[in-house]
Image: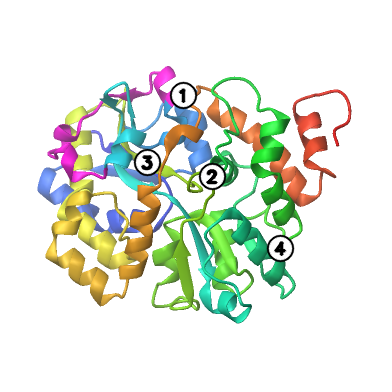
Amino acid sequence: MEPLRVWLKAGHTVEIIRRLLPEFREATGIDVALDVVPEGVAHDALVQGSPVADVVTVPFWYLEELRAAGTLLPIAAADVGLDESAFVPHALAALRRGGTLWAVPHTLTGGMLAYRQDLFEAAGLGRPQSLADVLTAHGVLRERGMGLVARCNGEFSSLETFSGWAAAKAVRLLPDAGDPTFEDLRDGVGDLVQALARGPQDLTGLDYAGVGNLVSDGKASHLFDTSAWAFQFEDPGSPVRGLMGYTTVGDARPAQFVYAEGLGITAGCHSEEAARQFIAWRHSEEVLRAEVVGVRRIDIPRADLRERDWYRDFVAGAGLEECLRAVDESWSGIDFRHIPLRVDFVEAARRLMGAISGTVSGKYASLALAYDVTYQQDGQRG
């Protein structure tokens, strides 16, 4: 029988799955050919209709593109032996369109500010609550070689840093069609772009791990990114364990850094039954427990985990109660209204991030110039 071809994103969970795969094969007789494929590479292959895997990671960001390309088959929680009540509702909502679910969710994040509580207190700064608090702290701590960091390289995934910041002001950075306006760009993220451009670190060449590691390495005082960083900073080997605070921030709304993904079945899958069995196994208690205990993934969007004694005991024993509280706070603030549902999302996001990242790096002298060059506008802006 032909192996089931599975594409996953890089991450600690991949190694958990790889290690447990022999048990899956023994139980089901299904061979799995597992490949780790970068998100951008996977996107390009999936939307271009290239021969791909049977089971793939489906990020919600470009779900419209996958649907338009006919890449995926619909799926239901019941197809993998689960009830929808087992999942956090936002995780399902991110991967559902018009009542149809396109992937079984396994990741959900919300926006979070992770900050060095000890450094904030030493500088006389309180718990940040607003966007102004975040920028004020940056101004103070930048003088000490620290300051704010955030994801701002040219990849499409970095756009959520800025769309989520703008969402806190009730500004929608990228519309459902067409180009963003300069006014929305300026009003939504001009302050954040300016702060990051004057930071102690050049952030534009770093991926998400590189940016977060600046906090771990003592080179940054606070990070605006996903809620997933909380349990990573509290890892037993982390040099900042016990020094961090975690909170949502915002103005009109909570600042967002929403990310959701799941496993979907491709339209070219050679065995839908084998694919469903794999996804069901991916959501089995054995695999989930290995994730939680092995890599401290307490933010798996399975609501039913909270009822498990082993889960509660692990969170308490590992001292992760505050992290879990912060994760729940970030999830409760999730608001999808700032995310455009467009079939050219990746192209549009990469283009906009070129302007933003170029301004942060110093390639463009101002955000106004970056906008005019990127969108071929005439005239000078103040």
Name the residue rendered at 36%, 33% in the picture: 53
Give residue 278's quadrant in the image: top left
> Taking 98 as reference, is 192 above or below it?
below
Along the line of sight, the residue nearer the viewer: 162 or 2:
162
Residue 288 position, x and y percent, is 22, 56
Q: Which residue is mark 2?
A: 168
Between marks 4 and 1 in the image, the one whose residue lies nearer the viewer? 4
CA distance separating discs 4 and 1: 34 Å
Q: Amino acid at mark 1?
A: Glu
Which residue type does callout 3 highlight? Glu
Whole-percent x and y of residue 65?
46, 24
Marked residue nearer the N-terminal end (1 or 2): 1
Residue 261 marker: 3
Q: 307 above or below 64?
A: below
Q: Is residue 354 visible?
A: no
Query: Which numbered mark, 4 or 2, is in the foreground of this view?
Result: 2
Q: CA distance from mark 1 to mark 3?
A: 14 Å
